[in-house]
Amino acid sequence: MINGCECSVKIHDKQRSKRWEGIFKDDWIPVAGPAIRGFSEFDGETSQPYHALAVYRMTQSEKLMVAQRTSEYFGISLDKMIDDLEKPNMIFPIIADDIMTFICPLHTRMLTT
């Protein structure tokens, strides 16, 4: 736990969840807080809300698995994906559709005070 945040999401869509299967404990993907980070066009037409993957909370082996699966799925070179995940300002979007969000105790306290 870095900065006290343990927020995460679990994808329910079978096709999308397969890309994340077995990377993180119980397939809960770490995100940078519970809030939607922005909207992005993923298919060139539809703007979709997304959470930001909390890369700073990932181990090196988790980063490598995410890089491998992402490079295969999107046809991006593995080296580029690994480099991108190491960039401090890189935002790796997790589409906020058909997901369950876990709001950690830190953010729960912030929401209730």
Image: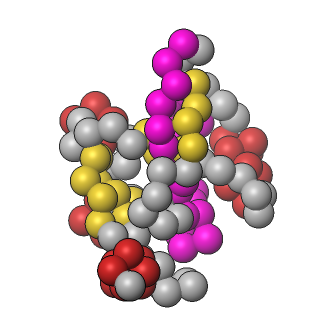
Where's residue 9, x and y in %?
Answer: 34, 57
Please, is residue 90 above or below residue 110 in the view?
above
Residue lying at 48% horizontally and 51% vertically, measured from the top left? 36
What number of labels is visible?
Answer: 0
27 to 46, vertically: above or below? below
- Residue nearer the viewer, 31 or 87: 31
Drawn side of residue 71 relative to residue 100, left or right: right
Q: Is residue 33 left or right of residue 26?
A: right
Instruction: Name the residue located 69 percent from the left edge and 34 percent from the top edge.
Output: 77
Q: Is residue 78 above or below residue 53?
A: above
- Predominant SS along the magenta part: helix
**Residue 38: % across, % down:** 57, 43
What residue is at 76 percent from the left and 63 percent from the top?
Answer: 88
- The question of residue 54 being in magenta is answered with yes
Q: Give the residue drawn at x 47%, y 38%.
A: 49
Observer able to see residue 53 = yes
Give yes or no for residue 79 being in the magenta stretch: no
Task: Please say whether residue 67 is visible from this viewpoint.
Answer: no
Q: In the rendered view of the protein, which quadrant contains the C terminus? A: bottom left
Q: Which residues are magenta?
A: 45-74
Task: Name the quadrant containing residue 76.
Answer: top right
Q: Position of residue 28 (x, y in %)?
A: 32, 62
Residue lying farthest front? Answer: 113
Left or right of residue 13, residue 83 in this image: right
Considering every residue shown, the one lying at the far top of the view is 45
Residue 49 or residue 70, whichever sits in front: 49
Instruction: Indicate the colouring scheme.
Output: secondary structure
Quadrant of the rendered image containing residue 17: top left
Q: Position of residue 99 (x, y in %)?
A: 28, 47
